[in-house]
Amino acid sequence: MATTFVFVLFLGFVLGGMMLMLAPAYLETERERARQAQERRAAKAIRASEAATAIPGFFAGLDATRIPPVPLAFDDALLAQLERHVRAEQAIVTQFVRYPSIDSLYRQEGSSFHLH
């Protein structure tokens, strides 16, 4: 019985010592991986900046900020039309949910829709 206790105690010390040695090694490996990933990101950023500076000067004048802005009147009109359509469809759905029938599912021309 005493030898079993000593053997279990010995194994506990051995396994505990191994865990104490493995934990710092694992943490050091993770720190090294993080450092390498940061170096790769920095190298990629440097390559991208070098590629941007390698553009000839006559292309550098073609800046996206010099493109004239698109008039927004067409976009606003299209957006307003889409909003009206969605609101009309929402009114149809609301009417169908409150009073489910085949007649209320289809839109009749000239009928007005109400939001309840």
Image (cartoon, rainbow, N blue to C red):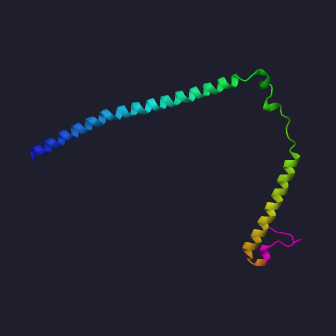
Q: Which residue is more in the foreground, 49 or 82? A: 49
Q: Is residue 16 left or right of residue 103?
A: left
Residue that extends furthest to the right in the rendered view of this protein: 110
Q: Is residue 101 left or right of residue 108?
A: left
Residue 16 coordinates in the image, percent (x, y): 26, 38
Residue at x 85%, y 56% (from the top left corner): 81
Asked if 91 appears above or below 52 in the picture, the reply is: below
Q: Which residue is more in the foreground, 50 or 5? A: 50
Asked if 12 appears above or below 114 in the picture, the reply is: above
Q: Main secondary structure of the magenta part?
A: loop
Residue at x 14%, y 41% (from the top left corner): 6
Residue at x 44%, y 29% (from the top left corner): 32
Q: Is residue 65 magenta?
A: no
Q: Quadrant of residue 115?
A: bottom right
Residue 108 coordinates in the image, percent (x, y): 85, 73
Q: Which residue is more in the foreground, 73 or 39? A: 39
Residue 62 coordinates in the image, percent (x, y): 80, 28
Residue 116 is at least partly visible in this image: no
Asked if 21 appears above or below 12 in the picture, the reply is: above
- Span shown in magenta: 103-115
Residue at x 77%, y 72% (from the top left corner): 95
Q: Is residue 32 left or right of residue 62?
A: left
Q: Quadrant of residue 71?
A: top right
Asked if 33 appears above or below 4 in the picture, the reply is: above
Q: Is residue 26 left or right of residue 103?
A: left
Q: Is residue 109 magenta?
A: yes
Residue 28 coordinates in the image, percent (x, y): 40, 30
